[in-house]
Image (cartoon, rainbow, N blue to C red):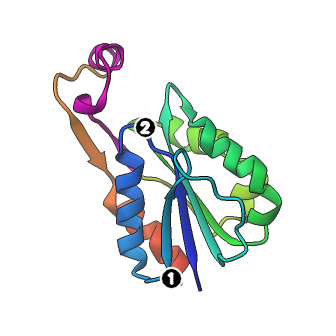
Amino acid sequence: MKTLIAFATHHGTTARAAELLKNELGADAIDLVNIKKQKITDLSAYNTVIVGGSIHAGNIQGAVKKFCETHKDVLLTKRAGYFICCMDRSEKEQEQLRNSYPAALLEKAIATGCFGGEFRLDKMNFIEKAIIKKIAKISESVSDIKTDAIKEFANSFKA
């Protein structure tokens, strides 16, 4: 069984979460693909497809939305899962997950997850830093990746 973890990342957090997920799944036949850098046109080689992206200003990257729209019919036939990375710990986290992916895909998903996030000031431009420092009231980079959520997500696929 071959697995694809397709993701989009802006500052590297989603790539890190995807790598942690790959390690938790423990399978050798897992391809990690940053869909912002590499196009995927054919999903036929994969039994399982996991899609992830990060939330910025309340929205997931356009590359993730486009990937899901383009491959929606095929994704509905696969063992699939969907996740987001975000720093919002409120009830909005689940709302953001629901708003990030088509309802039909989420309904058929083996697993969905909110994997936490990071504010990586070293990866942000001046404007991003200023906004994050003001809104989040932080002065240095913060990491809050939820490894327990990643393990739970992986266990759903291993079951």
* Residue that numbered label 2 is attached to: 10
Residue toward you, 159 or 119: 119
* Tag 1 secondary structure: helix
Label 1 Cα neighbours within 10 Å, binned few <14 / some 14-19 / many ≥20: few
Give the image location of residue 54, x and y in percent: 48, 41
Q: Which mark is residue 20?
A: none
The alpha-carbon separation of the residues under discs 1 and 2 comes to 29 Å
Give the image location of residue 48, x and y in percent: 62, 74
Q: Is residue 72 left or right of residue 112?
A: right
Instruction: Decide: is 66 above or below 31.
Output: above
Labels in figure, total = 2
* Residue that numbered label 1 is attached to: 158
Look at the image and say whether residue 133 sits in the magenta stretch.
yes
Q: Nearer the viewer, mark 1 or mark 2?
A: 2
Give the image location of residue 108, x and y in percent: 73, 65
Res 79 quadrant in image: bottom right
Q: Residue furthest right?
A: 73
Amino acid, disc 2: His
Amino acid, disc 1: Lys
* Tag 2 secondary structure: loop
Magenta-drawn stretch, dominant element (helix, strand or loop)? helix
Residue toward you, 52 or 123: 123
In which quadrant of the rendered image does the N terminus lie?
Answer: bottom right
Res 59 quadrant in image: top right
Residue drawn at 54 percent across, 44 percent down: 36
Res 58 quadrant in image: top right
Residue drawn at 46 percent across, 76 percent down: 155
Stretch of the chain drawn in magenta? 116-135
Label 2 Cα neighbours within 10 Å, binned few <14 / some 14-19 / many ≥20: some
